[in-house]
Every structure is written in C-alpha cells, then in structure tokens.
Amino acid sequence: MPVYTRTGDDGTTALFGGKRILKCEELVDVYGSIDELNSWIGVLLATDKNQRDKQLFLAIQQDLFLIGSVLAGWKGDISPLGKRILEMEQHIDAIETKVPKITNFILPGGSKSASYVHVVRSITRRVERQMVALFAKEKSSTVPDKNNQRKMITYINRLSDLLFMMARGINKTVGIKEVVWKGISTKSKE
C-alpha cells in the first residue's frame, strides 16, 4: 500500500466517517499539534535511559494517538486516559519528594535532557490551549462530549505537570542547579 493517496492534494483531509475538511481548520491544527507533541515524546524516548520512563512515554504516545483519533471523529472509549492520569500523578508525587520545594518560577533549561523535556512541556501547554479554544467554540459532530473534553484536557494538563517535574528530577539527578526567575526589577534605570 503506498503512503501517498493523492486525496489530500486538494488541501483537505478525511475524518472518521469519511467527511473531508480543509487542512487549515482549527480541528486539524489541534491534532497536528498533538502529532508534533507525540514526535517530541519520541525524542525523549530516544534520549532517556530510564526503563520506567520509557514505558510511561510509550504509553503516553498511545494515549496521544487515542486523543487525536477522538478529535478526528472516532467514537471509541477514552476511559484508559483516567488510569494514565493517576499514573502520571503518582510519578509526579514521587519526583516531588526528591527535588527542592519551589517558591519561584524556574527557567527552562539545565542539562540537555532536561531542556528537551522543557521543550516537550511547552508544546504540551500549546496543545492544551488549542484544545480549550476548539472546545469553547466548535460545535461539530467530531468534537467529543463535555465529559470526554474534560478528561482530555485534564490528561494534557497533567502531562505538562509531569514533564515539568521530570525536567526538575533530571537536573537534580545530574547535579545541575535550577535557575530561578528573579522577577522584574521595579527600580528605574537612569
């Protein structure tokens, strides 16, 4: 089976059920960003040496495909997302016991691995913003019901929390001190 079908050469793409929409529509933009996020999770998989993290990242990639499929009109079961949200929360809680408490914003960076995780975290935040915007105004038949919308947004929100804590944990493990944002100076410069 060839990769190219030529059906998208007119600038449209098919949803589940066969309906075709423009590739520039907001819905396609959202699941395109989810695809980008999934690709960056693949980068993390390629760089992470921790077997537990690899298993979690592989599961997250599966979940992201599930979310993208639902956005494209698939009417399947997304209940597995609830289990993964709990798993992410447990992972967050475990990391939180090992890193210093924070009282300020932390600048993204540190080790190369932690920096990659921060990039993925920021992409995750963009996906969350796009999903919220889509759900706030989209009334098409492909948009999931309110309960599933909430579950998907919660999942993406928790994923960004997990990635933030993972970046912190990586920096702690390799002995790189986090850089705290100092705020905005209120002193005028003359």
Image (cartoon, rainbow, N blue to C red):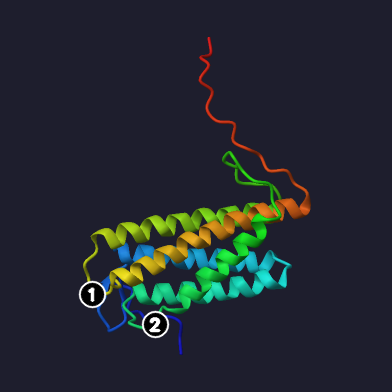
Q: In this view, does 9 lie to the left or right of 170?
A: left
Most foreground residue, 50 or 6: 50
Question: Outermost residue toward the left?
Answer: 139
Q: Where is residue 124 in the image (x, y as percent from the top left)?
A: 48, 59
* Residue located 27% across and 74% down the image: 142
| Marks 2 and 1, how far apart at CA | 16 Å
Residue 1 seen anywhere in this rendered image of the structure: yes
Q: Kindly indicate the quadrant of the structure image that contains residue 90.
A: bottom right
The residue type indicated by label 2 comes to Asp
Which of the two labelled residues, at mark 2 and mark 1, occupies the earlier sequence position?
A: 2
* Residue located 56% across and 64% down the image: 89
* Secondary structure under the numbered disc 1 in the rendered image: loop
The residue where tag 2 is placed is 77
Q: In this view, does 174 lie to the left or right of 95?
A: right
Most foreground residue, 81 or 122: 81
Q: Which mark is residue 141?
A: 1
Most foreground residue, 185 or 117: 185
Q: Kindly indicate the quadrant of the structure image that contains residue 68.
A: bottom left
Q: Where is residue 183 in the image (x, y as percent from the top left)?
A: 55, 30
* Secondary structure under the numbered disc 2 in the rendered image: loop
Most foreground residue, 31 or 53: 53
Q: In this view, does 79 lie to the left or right of 18?
A: right
The residue type indicated by label 1 comes to Ser
